[in-house]
Image (cartoon, rainbow, N blue to C red):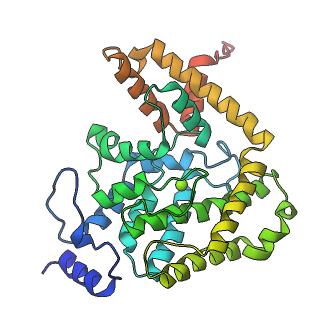
Amino acid sequence: MNIRERYQEIEKSFLHPKSCLSSQTKGRLKPEPEDDIRTPFQRDRDRIIHSKAFRRLKHKTQVFFSPQGDHYRTRLTHVFEVSQISRTIARALRLNEDLTEAIALGHDLGHTPFGHAGEAILRELHPGGFEHYEQSLRVVDILEKNGKGLNLTFEVRDGILKHSKGRGKILSDEPFTLEGQIVRVGDVIAYINHDIDDAIRAGIIKKNDIPQEFLKFFGDRHSKRIDKMVRDVIFTTIKEDYEKISMSPEMEQMVHSFRDFLFEKVYYNERIIEEFKKAKRMLESLYNYYLDNPHIIDAQELEEKELHRKICDFIAGMTDRYALYTFEKIFIPKSWAVP
Ligand code: MG
């Protein structure tokens, strides 16, 4: 028995019967020989961490564009917070922590520069539409490794594709595994809390703008609020016998209201919206420029549909700062140096 097989025996004896065992994965798009040390989900996590798209997350917006302040979240730190919260839940429930971690680290790989502003403009311009969760799957299936993709397991790909909910229902039995459902909830718990924290840091809201009912219910500190939500998910899921990842009705309703508060006061805040429009205009200019000058991205031979796809993938993959740099290079005249 090799190391991986021994570990998979431990999974079988230790994990909850409703967990997703790595020995029972539905497999990869292209079959591959097994590793003798790591399980398929551990390999997926490692492939994600070693990908280029993962490294680019450090310069992609969470809410605040290309922030100067070092304490603002970026897409990369968001993903770590989602991973930490989700792993705590998975471990407490004796579900597969490796699978949970792989989904959490991969879930936002398809995010555009400038967050949802980028997503909104690509949705408008690309004839096939655009959703960041579909793009995340595209990154791991096709775009990484120069078109070869990472060849991840079915369970990780499923969790990545179904993590997103916009303003829709937080809980869902859509992800095929309970581990995928955890990341869907962990994503919300992470962003609600860190976006409030960053909004206070940015002066968009003040600490005492948070309504009393939320402070009373969730707690008056960032860490208390996360703790309260995480505990509720763990104990409600146990109480409901792992039917799906759950929250108590009261918690679910309060989290929805808290998210609404965030949308109204932060995401739709005038100062944020102003920047949102600028980011959209900038990416739109880039998109149209590449459409008129396909040779710049080596796409002069492509049919119209493929050209759009290539431009969309290229822009979606940009970091905030690369988009700014490219825009400046193309559209801003250089000041002539004094000889
Ligand atoms: Mg996310």
Residue under the image location 56 percent in, 45 percent down = 60
Query: Along the horizontal axis of the image, is 116 left or right of 22?
Result: right
Residue 131 pos. (x, y %) = 48, 41
Residue under the image location 78 percent in, 74 percent down = 220
The residue lying toward the viewer, choosing from 258 and 1, is 258
User: In the rendered image of this protein, does residue 75 appear above or below residue 172?
Assistant: above
Quadrant of the image containing the N terminus: bottom left
User: In the rendered image of this protein, does residue 56 appear above or below residue 301?
Assistant: below
Residue under the image location 36 percent in, 70 percent down = 98
The residue lying toward the viewer, choosing from 323 and 26, is 26
Residue 68 pos. (x, y %) = 70, 46
The residue lying toward the viewer, choosing from 49 and 151, is 151
Query: Along the horizontal axis of the image, is 298 left or right of 190?
Result: left
Residue under the image location 45 percent in, 81 percent down = 93
Residue 226 pos. (x, y %) = 64, 72
Instruction: Tell how many labels.
Output: 0
Q: Is residue 216 visible?
A: yes
Residue 15 pos. (x, y %) = 34, 82
